[in-house]
Image (cartoon, helix red, strand yellow):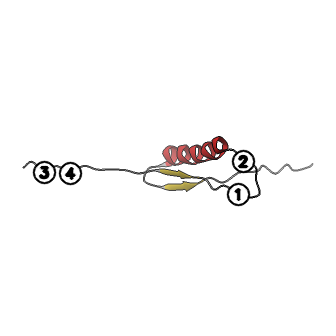
Amino acid sequence: MNEETISVTLSLGVAQAEKQENETLDELLNKADIALYTVKQNSRNQVRVYEEKKEILKRT
């Protein structure tokens, strides 16, 4: 029997549905995709939870 070692990596993007929001499944999956692409751009073998980033506008 020929034994070989196979290396496996796992990167996950996670998004949470909120009860009060009227969000579609497509929108939820898009958020998970955004989190996954963030992991793949930065490194591998991680789980990233989607976080909505809101820009704060400063008045001058």
Whole-percent x and y of residue 54?
76, 50
Asked if the residue under mark 4 is in contact with the one under mark 3, i.e. CB atoms within 8 Å, the reply is yes
Name the kind of residue labelled 3 in the image: Glu
35 lies above or below 18: above
> Neighbour class for label 2 at 10 Å: few (<14), some, many (≥20)?
few
State left or right for residue 3 relative to residue 29: left
- Mark sitting on residue 5: 4
Asked if the residue under mark 2 is in contact with the one under mark 3, i.e. CB atoms within 8 Å, the reply is no
The single residue placed furthest to the bottom in the displayed view is 19
Determine whether the residue tagged by mark 3 lies in a helix, strand or loop.
loop
Looking at marks 4 and 1 on the same chain, the residue that comes earlier in the sequence is marked by 4
Q: Which residue is mark 2?
A: 23
Determine whether the residue tagged by mark 2 lies in a helix, strand or loop.
loop
Q: CA distance from mark 3 to mark 4?
A: 7 Å
Asked if the residue under mark 1 is in contact with the one under mark 2, i.e. CB atoms within 8 Å, the reply is yes
Looking at marks 3 and 2 on the same chain, the residue that comes earlier in the sequence is marked by 3
Q: Which residue is mark 1?
A: 18
Q: CA distance from mark 4 to mark 2?
A: 43 Å
Q: CA distance from mark 4 to mark 1?
A: 42 Å
Whole-percent x and y of residue 25?
64, 44
Looking at marks 2 and 1 on the same chain, the residue that comes earlier in the sequence is marked by 1
State left or right for residue 14 relative to residue 44: right
Name the kind of residue labelled 2 in the image: Glu
Asked if the residue under mark 2 is in contact with the one under mark 4, i.e. CB atoms within 8 Å, the reply is no
- Mark sitting on residue 3: 3
Q: CA distance from mark 3 to mark 1?
A: 47 Å
Looking at marks 4 and 2 on the same chain, the residue that comes earlier in the sequence is marked by 4
